[in-house]
Image: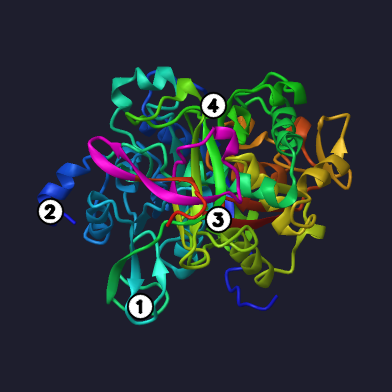
């Protein structure tokens, strides 16, 4: 540990709430999903309306703003409200820093995600979704050659394959791991099994990546209640504390100008996590690499230090557990036991965060990691949304 | 070189692009089939996409400077589906999208498609040069395999 971290273990997650996840929630608004998740989280935490003085609502397309949520829930005295961008850890960092600094004591942090009109036919047919755009919206349609954040992962996957000779099976193992884990998570939308043959024959979308390399859009919401660890001890017998959490970017983060795969946002995140913490991969009981695209997962595995650059495919093969059909690092540590964005649903990291809390509370049922004490989350990708967090059981 | 068009006319020529005061020079260049990349008058470094200042030395004295358009493919993907454009038909085959390392400066890259060769020939490492197609009635910069001896 070489950097100061005064917030270490000082902020706790005391409540978790979700909706069911669906490929079509059917005639409900993102605000409705957000309210359902928020109420579940508030009840789970055992706090009152008047206790919640911070509201952090991540700016997912169509999601209600923090002030709108405060109005929907009629929260009477809110002293901090904000709207960080996706993905999940931006919201976590905002909430924890607001509490630690004294701007508020107890935060409702929520995320509502909605299939956008181009994600599915049923979403396109919903006239109430037509205004929804990623990133706050732009009047201009994309062009085929746009190296936008999504396409850029495929572009850099081509470089990864070029530099390391990675095979399609290397990418496929990420998808298979998530699908096998999803079968043990009733919330996951993808409940049917996936074989390597299925993966290899899946429709190419942007070659070299196919449909199964990309996360699955869903309607749903997750919410969390955070407060000081001191207050948390009075609220719950099993608070989960944030050991550290961070974002990370490099200067050259325009998608096609990223210098190389050896130093981007993930590397900044990892350096910050290591320098603020005594906990690292040998101490981790459950690992949550982001999987919006399979290439991101391969990169987190490598960059975290589980294996050398280019070695993630082989690493997964070496740590493959045939009985469960998934990765168990050293026969023990699973990777996204909830099924990740690829198979639980594209919650842009909130599923990873929720499952980390669930595992550390010991509430994960048949997918519970025995005596899970620490969780490592690598959230987001390479460019503008790389993030990470280490959570632990108090 | 044609007369420079005013801002209003420029926006009308590229209704499909979000043009800003920082990127207007790039698109004015397209109308003359010239690829103008921001270059810093102070430290001489290029940058792309266009920014209001030089990210290296923070000088705001920038000159959109014509580049050769020659380079080497650094990233390559092949869209089986994607955003529409009048010159792109995904049903006819994958649409290549490449990011090219321009020869003017290491790591200075420009992304577009590749024309003039079978899609199978589009690979990382291929030497390419700039050419222009028409899209929505305005010039659009694309790449083609480098022809020996051509400038």
Please provide the residue range marked out in magenta: B111-140
Q: Which residue is mark 4?
A: A20
Say the numbered circle drawn on residue A187. Answer: none
Q: Which residue is mark 3?
A: A386
Q: What residue is at 54 percent from the left and 33 percent from the top?
A: B118
Q: What residue is at 50 percent from the left and 50 percent from the top?
A: B128
Q: Is residue A13 left or right of residue A143?
A: right
How much space separates mark 2 and mark 3, taking CA atoms?
41 Å
How much space separates mark 1 and mark 4, taking CA atoms?
49 Å
Q: What residue is at 31 percent from the left and 49 percent from the top?
A: A76
Q: Which residue is mark 2?
A: B5
Of labels 1 and 4, the one closer to you: 1
Q: Chain of mark 1?
A: B
Q: Chain of mark 2?
A: B
Image: A367 above or below A10: above
Do badges 1 and 4 share one subunit?
Answer: no
Q: Chain of mark 3?
A: A
Other residues around mark 3 within 10 Å, as few (<14) / some (14–19) / many (≥20) = many
């Amino acid at each position: 540990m070489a950097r100061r971290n005064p917030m270490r273990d000082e902020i706790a997650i005391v409540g978790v709430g979700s909706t069911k996840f669906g490929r079509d929630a059917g005639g409900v608004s993102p605000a409705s999903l957000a309210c359902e998740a928020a109420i579940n989280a508030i009840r789970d935490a055992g706090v009152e309306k008047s206790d919640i003085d911070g509201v952090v609502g991540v700016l997912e397309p169509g999601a209600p703003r923090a002030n709108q949520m405060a109005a929907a829930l009629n929260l009477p005295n809110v002293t901090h409200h904000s709207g960080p961008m996706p993905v999940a850890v931006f919201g976590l960092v905002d909430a924890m820093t607001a509490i630690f600094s004294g701007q508020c004591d107890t935060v409702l942090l929520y995320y509502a995600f909605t299939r956008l009109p181009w994600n599915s036919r049923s979403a396109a047919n919903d006239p109430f979704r037509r205004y929804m755009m990623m990133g706050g919206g732009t009047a201009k349609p994309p062009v085929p050659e746009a190296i936008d954040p999504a396409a850029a992962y495929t572009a850099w996957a081509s470089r990864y394959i070029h530099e390391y000779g990675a095979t399609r099976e290397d990418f496929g193992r990420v998808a298979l791991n998530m699908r096998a884990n999803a079968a043990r998570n009733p919330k996951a939308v993808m409940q049917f099994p996936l074989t390597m043959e299925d993966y290899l024959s899946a429709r190419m979308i942007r070659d070299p990546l196919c449909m199964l390399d990309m996360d699955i859009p869903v309607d749903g919401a997750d919410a969390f209640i955070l407060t000081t660890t001191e207050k948390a001890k009075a609220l719950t017998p099993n608070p989960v504390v944030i050991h550290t959490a961070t974002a990370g970017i490099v200067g050259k983060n325009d998608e096609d100008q990223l210098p190389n795969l050896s130093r981007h946002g993930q590397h900044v995140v990892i350096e910050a996590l290591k320098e603020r913490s005594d906990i690292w991969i040998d101490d981790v009981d459950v690992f949550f690499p982001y999987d919006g695209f399979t290439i991101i997962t391969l990169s987190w595995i490598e960059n975290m230090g589980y294996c050398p650059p280019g070695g993630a495919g082989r690493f997964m093969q070496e740590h493959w557990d045939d009985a469960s059909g998934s990765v168990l690092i050293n026969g023990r540590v699973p990777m996204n036991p909830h099924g990740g964005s690829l198979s639980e649903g594209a919650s842009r990291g909130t599923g990873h965060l929720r499952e980390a809390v669930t595992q550390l509370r010991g509430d994960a049922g048949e997918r519970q990691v025995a005596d899970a004490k620490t969780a490592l989350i690598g959230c987001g990708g390479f460019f503008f949304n790389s993030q990470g967090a280490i959570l632990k059981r108090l | 070189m044609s007369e420079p068009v005013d801002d209003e006319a420029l926006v009308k020529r590229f209704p499909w692009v979000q043009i800003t005061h920082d990127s207007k020079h790039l698109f004015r260049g397209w109308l003359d089939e010239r690829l103008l990349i921001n270059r810093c008058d102070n430290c001489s470094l290029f940058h792309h996409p266009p920014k209001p200042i030089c990210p290296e030395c923070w000088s705001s004295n920038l000159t959109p400077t014509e580049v050769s358009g020659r380079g080497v493919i650094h990233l390559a993907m092949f869209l089986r589906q994607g955003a529409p454009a009048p010159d792109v038909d995904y049903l006819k085959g994958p649409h290549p999208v490449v990011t090219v390392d321009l020869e003017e400066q290491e790591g200075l890259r420009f992304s577009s498609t590749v024309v003039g060769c079978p899609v199978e020939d589009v690979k990382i490492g291929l030497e390419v040069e700039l050419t222009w197609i028409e899209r929505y009635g305005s010039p659009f910069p694309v790449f083609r395999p480098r022809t020996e001896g051509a400038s």
